């Protein structure tokens, strides 16, 4: 995505249309559009030809671009789970790895980055963990691996807002939920994690469904909104869409209990379980 954004800027500076750029690499205008949005893989030959077309002659600059192509084509750690993942979720994990801020709202489950292994297993096995096999084990391992993004140097800021019903839905049973509440309490001690709970009395007003917004450090990259459904996912990046979901998330944070009150709610829930 970063490379695509740089190439778009070079094309626009050279006053070259997407049609002309596509023709120069024996392809179409739509291919250039997808390339600039980071939605297709890049070939060194194509990028080299585009750099020539855009007037980039400096060898050092060209080498930097081509090195970016090589890195962009290196498989991420999640590719070893490729047989479990649909293509649309492959994209999301890569974006999640690169984000500097992750804003998420969940109505049904604890956010994936905050789930315990037992909670994740209960979901992956549809409530029958005793029937789980190697595939379930790998799905859970994938989710646990995703969570390491919060422990690495320069970890993204995670701001999660969850509906209060999530805490009262007995996923996996009492012991699993108790451990999950303990995990949430521990996560709220991390400086880069913010958790808020929307109380029942305000539930359902600000948003009609779960969503995640990803923000990136590179100014060329737009924010993205990710909405998952049963057979796929939507990636929204138009300014009007981002503005709408930003306002919705702001409303959710106002409706929700403060982070401090959320901790008190979790402590009370733990005592009652």
Image (cartoon, rainbow, N blue to C red):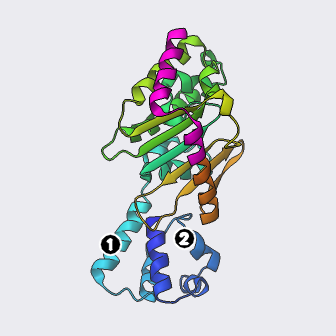
Q: Return the residue nearer the eye: 170 or 35.
A: 170
Residue shown at the point (63%, 24%) measured from the top left: 125
Mark 2 or mark 1: name the one nearer the start of the chain: 2
Q: Quarter-wise, where is residue 197 in the image? A: top right
Q: Is residue 265 magenta?
A: yes
Picture coordinates of residue 46, whole percent (x, y):
48, 77
Task: Identify the disc placed on residue 35.
Answer: 2
Picture coordinates of residue 97, whole percent (x, y):
44, 49
The residue range painted magenta reads: 250-273
Residue 43 appears in the rendering: no
Q: Return the residue nearer the eye: 206 or 241.
A: 206
Task: Count all numbered tags in the image, as a single digit.
Answer: 2
Q: Which residue is mark 1?
A: 64
Residue shown at the point (51%, 47%) measured from the top left: 93
Q: Does 146 sit left or right of 19 as displayed? A: left
Residue shown at the point (42%, 80%) measured from the top left: 48
Element at label 1:
helix
- Dominant secondary-structure state across the stretch colored magenta: helix
């Amino acid at each position: 995505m970063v490379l695509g954004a740089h190439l778009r800027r070079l094309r626009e500076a050279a006053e070259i249309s997407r049609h002309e750029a596509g023709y120069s690499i024996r392809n179409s205008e739509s291919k250039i559009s997808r390339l600039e949005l980071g939605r297709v893989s890049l070939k060194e030959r194509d990028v080299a030809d585009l750099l020539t077309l855009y007037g980039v002659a400096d060898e050092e600059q060209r080498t930097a671009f081509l090195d970016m192509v090589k890195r962009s084509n290196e498989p991420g750690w999640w590719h070893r789970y490729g047989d479990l993942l649909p293509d649309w979720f492959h994209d999301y994990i890569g974006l999640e790895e690169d984000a500097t801020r992750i804003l998420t709202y969940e109505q049904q489950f604890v956010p994936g980055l905050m789930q315990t292994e037992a909670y994740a297993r209960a979901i992956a096995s549809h409530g029958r963990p005793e029937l789980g096999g190697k595939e379930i084990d790998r799905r859970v391992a994938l989710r646990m691996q995703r969570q390491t993004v919060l422990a690495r140097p320069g970890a993204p800021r995670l701001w999660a807002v969850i509906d209060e019903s999530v805490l009262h839905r007995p996923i996996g049973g009492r012991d699993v939920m108790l451990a999950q509440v303990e995990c949430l309490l521990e996560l709220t001690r991390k400086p880069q994690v913010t958790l808020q709970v929307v109380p029942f009395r305000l539930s359902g007003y600000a948003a009609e469904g779960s969503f995640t917004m990803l923000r990136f450090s590179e100014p060329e990259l737009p924010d993205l909104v990710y909405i998952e459904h049963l057979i796929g996912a939507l990636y929204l990046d138009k300014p009007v869409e981002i503005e709408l979901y930003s306002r919705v998330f702001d409303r959710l944070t106002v409706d929700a209990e403060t982070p401090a009150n959320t901790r008190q709610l979790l402590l009370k829930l733990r005592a009652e379980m």
